[in-house]
Image (tube, rainbow, N blue to C red):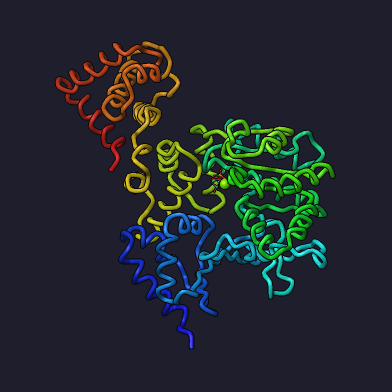
Amino acid sequence: MEKSHDKVWDSCLNIIRDNVSTQSFKTWFEPIKALKLASSVLTIQVPSQFFYEWLEEHYITLLKKTIKKELGSEGKLEYSIIMENAFSSNTKPYTVKIPTSNRRDAKNPAVNMPLDLNTKTIRNPFIIPGLKKVSVESQLNVNYSFENLVEGDCNRLARSAGWAVADKPGGTAFNPLLIYGGVGLGKTHLAHAIGLQIKYKHPGKTVLYVSSEKFTHQFIDAIKNNNQNDFIHFYQMIDVLIIDDVQFFAGKDKTQDVFFHIFNHLHQTGKQIVLTSDKPPVEMQGMEQRLLSRFKWGLSADLQIPGLETRIAILEKKLYIDGIELPREVVEYLAYSITTNIRELEGAYISLLAQASLNKKAITLDLAKQMIDKFVKNTAREVSIDYIQKVVCDYFDLPIELLKSKTRKREVVQARQIAMYFAKSMTKSSLATIGMHCGGKDHATVLHACRTVNNLMDTDKRFRAYIEELEKKLSIQ
Ligand code: ADP
Ligand code: MG
């Protein structure tokens, strides 16, 4: 007889506890609930897609080992993520199952929903053999909608091209639409948003989102099972094919070959193709020339790192979606401190919520500072000149534009000198860089500012108190 899922998960937790820090354990393992255990498959419920991705990214090896230890070599783990379906009136949450131990196995679907394709004659590679009528539609994550994708300078072109494509799939010059950009900048989100919008506006169209990794594994399976033709035909029936992270095709000649044929067929029959990649076509290596030249047929649009305002807007959007209120200063602090990409920003935000709720603490600026200190990589941890300027301006109740201007009004000059002083002592920026940020001054002016502040601190008690108070506001910890 099989053990109960609770017991098994408890034993797993005991092993995990010994292998991760207390903080990580609290944040990432305590919120997990074991749901069921059947045929050596343990299903665990995780609170969000992000949570799932975090586990897969950081703890996959540990989880695998633990499961095998508890359930034997046959042991597997499935995740259940609660999601809401924005486009159906049926608000019942549905479940996403993503097997851990063979996540790449094409036979395992990601989202179980009925497919409106006629799949009687052609084997659908998303169907799990043995389970009747379980097939996959679209594979789209409803949270990744256009509505949830904040617009900024960083994504304006890509976003509007995506919107145009969604309006008239296959009917614009943007075919294929290739979205490229660094990690965590919203490629996958935009790709889903386009798919969701097409399903909304053109319910009759068959939309399919697939990662190039999954596509590759499905193809390998098709070769193994000798049903390559079914594989090709399945993909040739799709009206809107969205392939994420095509750079993964690099060096995989056979996959590129089959994709080339599918691409041609779809393109010739006026079907829409949307691709994402971590680099522009000119920089893609290991990709056949004929594919690269096709990638350039339509539009390549890039995603950039969002500026501060967009980062704040993204956080505010998240708060709104999650129905959470955070002090404005916390939102700003997160947005100021985490400049690398949106995924990291979200990660910090979620860790902060998790910590606050697990430790039953209010989310304050202090907690945010402590958390950033622990979670964010060293490079992103340094206080930025922008942040210093903002804190100083808030403190003296000055508009930041004045501080950045060339004005020589006394109160502005002093605030500017103080900002320079902190920029010098708290960041690694050069004197020239600091000067440039503070009204286009040269390095000598910055040096002079630092001396002036030091002198005043020695001679003027009140001034010293200002500086100490500001220092507290700025310091991490
Ligand atoms: P990529 O595929 O480029 O690595 P993702 O699409 O996975 O990046 O984005 C990382 C996270 O950032 C996702 O959770 C996504 O929802 C969020 N995100 C990215 N861009 C935006 C945006 N403009 N507005 C709101 N959230 C965004
Ligand atoms: Mg992605």
Q: Is residue 239 left or right of residue 52?
A: right
Quarter-of-image position of residue 358: bottom left
Q: Residue at 40% of width from left, 15% of height from top?
A: 439
Q: Nearer the viewer, residue 300 or 90?
A: 300
Q: Residue at 48% of width from left, 88% of height from top?
A: 1
Residue 279: x percent and y percent? 57, 36
Residue 115: x percent and y percent? 75, 63
Quarter-of-image position of residue 407: top left
Residue 21: x percent and y percent? 31, 59
| Residue 142 visible in rendering | no
For the C terminus, give its image quadrant: top left
| 399 up-or-down from 89: above or below | above
Q: Residue at 60% of width from left, 40% of height from top?
A: 277
Q: Nearer the viewer, residue 291 or 160?
A: 291
Residue 121: x percent and y percent? 82, 66
| 383 up-or-down from 54: above or below | above
| Residue 423 visible in rendering | yes
Q: How many marks?
A: 0
